[in-house]
Image (spheres, rainbow, N blue to C red):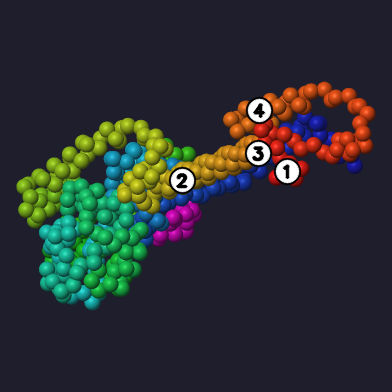
Amino acid sequence: MNLPTMSPRRSLASLAFAFLLLCLASPAPAAAPDELVWRGDHATGRALMEDLAKEYAKGKMGKITLQPFSTVSGLDAVAQGSADFAGSARGKYARRAEEANLTFVPGALDAAVLITHPRNPVNSITLKQMHDIYLGRITNWKELGGEDKPINLYGIAASLDGVEYSLRQLVFGRGDQRVAAPRLYMNTSKLEEAISIDPAGLGLSTLAGTWTNKSVKALQVDGINASTASIVDGSYPLYIKLYLVTPANSPKQAAIDRFVEFLGTPTAKDILRRHQLVPISDVLDLAARETKRIDWFDAQLGRAPGTTAAIAAAEAAEAAPATAAAQPPTPVSAPRAMLESKVAVAPTAESTQAARENLARAEAKKAAEREAAANRAAVTSAAQATAATSAAAATSVAATTAPAKHATGAPSKAKVAKETKPAPKKTKMPAKADAQAAAPKAASFGNVSGGANGG
């Protein structure tokens, strides 16, 4: 039986149709999950990010690598592009050009808490007492109703640390207010460890970071415990905002936006609540409450109404030009001064490490220049010594070979005349005369005769 044959054109059309059906039947390849790097302070890392990152990965939405260290290190990493977003327990600091192009998105409310050792009998502190402790006016626990012991006040080395900054901004109106905290640590985790072994210790941390830590005790403020309930109703005065910080322009902006959207989902909000945080959307009257809180602070601290707000406004106005201006160049002519200024503000920042490395290079260069100068001086000294030796040797040779001088310093004319006088013709002499002539004649030096023995 002869089978019908198919033309080449019809065969190609059939293959194309079959390929189209295959493409329609096959599912589209899934988009690759997002990969983001987060960096920030330990308080935000523990409270806001660990479980969120796990849930984000569990939902196959993406992978988030966490790098908890410090507030400023996280902000600088985002500004420099080595991290995609950061966590911060404070808002933007307008005096730092590094933060000018960063966006601070509030995500939750936490509480700043003063912590001490569990065996410390003091359980509560007033806002005024806190103010005076940080200014060094109260230095003994007995002034707070405790034992007669000095207060060992602990703090974070970086004055722009998130929790420290937020508290000082509330109490003093300036987040960079200098305080009398001589015992400094790099982050709240290390500070909590120090408090846990010091019955006279006092320091600052967060509710989310310490609520499960039985080795420290959180103090009440004016008789109010820090809790999610007291944050929501506003009765606990030291609540603070936790921020997600993003760059102005990022190649991963779409992925960052997806994570920000995730923070608004019920799943993410439940995670925040489990960590004693209050989702920012749970407090609807937050802006109006802020004004009342600042007025209460002024009343408790004996200041005129509006004082704290005026201080904060003046600080913002003073720093406004720095925000708009471009980042100034690093003064390489004064690397030590640059390092000291950065250490005072942000000792753990990457820009501080860069200043530290710049100083090391400058000092190494100076050391090499000093060594080279010392080597050149040694070579010059050796050359001078060699020249002096050669000159002395030449003088000695000249003195040995130079014509002898008369006592008056003039050359001996008698000797010159004698040496240049033609030798006399030999004549026949008697034998006795011959013997005398054969004997060597002593050299004559002016009027002095040396004799046969050179006497």
Q: Is residue 286 visible?
A: no
Dot 3 or dot 1: first in sequence order is: 3
Q: Residue at x 36, y 51 (%)?
A: 347
* Residue 91 place in picture, x, y as percent: 28, 46
Label 1 secondary element: loop
**How far is disc 2 from disc 4 in space, using C-alphas?**
65 Å
**Residue 396 disc label:** 3
Specify the amino acid type for callout 4: Pro
Label 2 secondary element: helix
Q: Would you name the residue on which mark 4 appears? A: 411
The answer to whether mark 1 and mark 2 are in CB contact below 8 A is no
Q: Is residue 52 magenta?
A: yes
Q: How many marks?
A: 4
Dot 4, crowdedness within 10 Å: few (<14), some or many (≥20)?
some
Dot 4 or dot 1: first in sequence order is: 4
Measured along the vertical axis of the image, is residue 53 above or below residue 97? below
Residues drawn in magenta: 49-67
Q: Residue at x 25, y 37 (%)?
A: 319
